[in-house]
Amino acid sequence: MILALAAMWVVPSMANASPEASVPEAAWVTMTGVGLPVFIDGRVRNHIFVEMKLHLKAGFAVEKARAKDTVMRDALVREGHRRSFGMADNWNRIDERALATAVMQIAATHLGRGNVVRVEIVRQTPRRRVRTVPVAPAR
């Protein structure tokens, strides 16, 4: 009888602890080899190949994000041809903040708002090393 009462006290507390432990961890999806042009004054100056990690909301299925990878990659390349993500003072780098903002907008469209928590730019590889020509100040 005493053991039965002790078991009644232990079992509910274990049941309350298990949902917290069973919450799935947040995952990420890697987008590799996305080639984005850097154009200044209407001329393509370089291409940068970017590798990114899309950090997903806890519980969001990684398979859903991987299934939309090609659609999101296509939308990002299209956006990269509409406006340059390149930095005006360094043609070998991408403006990470502008790129992350664009990827978050694309992800909200294709994966749903809030399912991508943040975008991490892992690597930027320029097609070629280009010496940046300093911009002359306006007179």
Image (tube, rainbow, N blue to C red):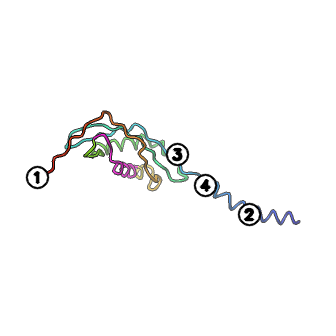
User: What segment carries the magenta color?
Assistant: 91-106
Q: Which residue in the structure is indicated by mark 2?
A: 12
Instruction: Indicate the position of residue 66 as horizontal and vertical percent values.
Output: 48, 42
Name which residue lies at 68% across and 57% down: 18
Locate residue 72: give its quadrant.
top left
Instruction: Indicate the position of residue 26 as horizontal and vertical percent values.
Output: 54, 51
Q: Which residue in the structure is indicated by mark 1?
A: 139
Name which residue lies at 45% across and 47% down: 54
| Mark 4 / mark 3, whichever is N-terminal | 4
Position of residue 117 relative to residue 32, above or below, is below
Name which residue lies at 48% across and 44% down: 29
Helix, strand or loop at label 3? It is: helix
| Mark 1 / mark 3, whichever is N-terminal | 3
Disc number for residue 110: none
Q: CA distance from mark 2 to mark 4?
A: 18 Å
Q: Around disc 1, counting alpha carbons within 10 Å, would you say few (fewer than 14), some (14 to 19), or many (20 or more)? A: few
Name which residue lies at 55% across and 52% down: 59
Relative placement, left or right, of 91 versus 55 is left
Relative placement, left or right, of 56 versus 3 is left
Q: Which residue in the structure is indicated by mark 4?
A: 23
